[in-house]
Image (cartoon, grey):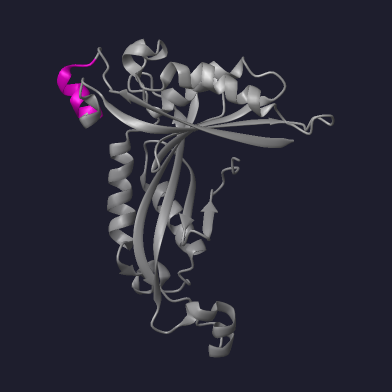
Amino acid sequence: MIAYLNRRYRFAASHRLHSPEMSAEENRATYGKCNNPHGHGHNYTLEVTVSGPVDQPTGMVCNLVDLDGFVEREVLDRYNLQNLNTLQEFAKRVPTTENLCVEIFEILQRGFPYAHLERVKLEETMMNSFEYTGHNQPRR
Amino acid sequence: MVYLTRKAEFSASHYYHNPEFSAEENLRLFGKCNNANGHGHNYTLEVTVKGEVDPRSGFVVDLKQLKDIMHREVLDAMDHRFLNKEVPEFFSRIPTTENLAIAIWQRLETKLQRARLHRVRVYETPELFVDFYGED
């Protein structure tokens, strides 16, 4: 009995999309308003999906306290109310929501042992969202 | 193949307790959810069925039938109930959102006619929901 547990979290952060490999004009043409030198911010919503057999004694895929604790410590404390461009993982990569989504997937993949990580979905606004499933086949 | 999703809402109370564990162990594992007087949620249920579109009716499933089955099998049994005490599946199983999704799947699976059940999604809150796709 494999079930898929989905949990949503919120954080806010700022970023500027700018690639040192492009000229100023090319950056402006590629990133538009997101290339503003002073940066801008979003309220992100993070959706984490983990899966596993439902443990009969507890009725759970994994204890939410463990998942919430991990995400709070390793993801929210790291990114909430930060300027993403100042963080080490974005020193050489553009902090697009695609890259942030992959980064968060990898943090969970490396450090969360209590259930199988299926998917990370990151909503930048109500209109845009990104999903990363690593090697997993995405489920409809 | 076309997928059709029907939503419903119900409200119910529950608590988490395993009689095989000590009181301390129950409290440690389940925290506030262990309060024996229960607490409640407004659940949202999403049932997704799949099938080929019937060329005569243009339907994957007769929505009225699906709605009636969801009402009879799920809402009549669970809406405004204390899950631990009034829904037989939870006399011996803990009514977590995971087990709720599985129980609802099992209640619906055999009742559907033309369309096949694809997914049962149960939202306990907008921030926590469980998907079950059967025993694949």
Q: Is residue A122 above or below residue A16?
A: above
Comparing A108 with A9, the one in front is A9
Q: Position of residue B56 (x, y in %)?
A: 84, 29
Q: Position of residue A104 (x, y in %)?
A: 42, 55
Stretch in magenta: B21-30
Q: Is residue A123 visible?
A: yes
Q: Position of residue A82 (x, y in %)?
A: 31, 68
- Left or right placement of residue B58 versus residue A23 in this view: right
Comparing B44 with B130, the one in front is B44
Q: Position of residue A13 (x, y in %)?
A: 35, 67
Magenta stretch secondary structure, dominant: helix
Does the magenta portion include A112?
Answer: no
Residue shown at 30% from the left, 60% from the top: A78
Q: Is residue B37 above or below residue A23?
A: above
State the image quarter where residue B28 is shown: top left
Q: Is residue B49 above or below residue B126?
A: above
Instruction: Give the residue at the far right of this rendering.
Output: B56
State the image quarter where residue A38 is shown: bottom left
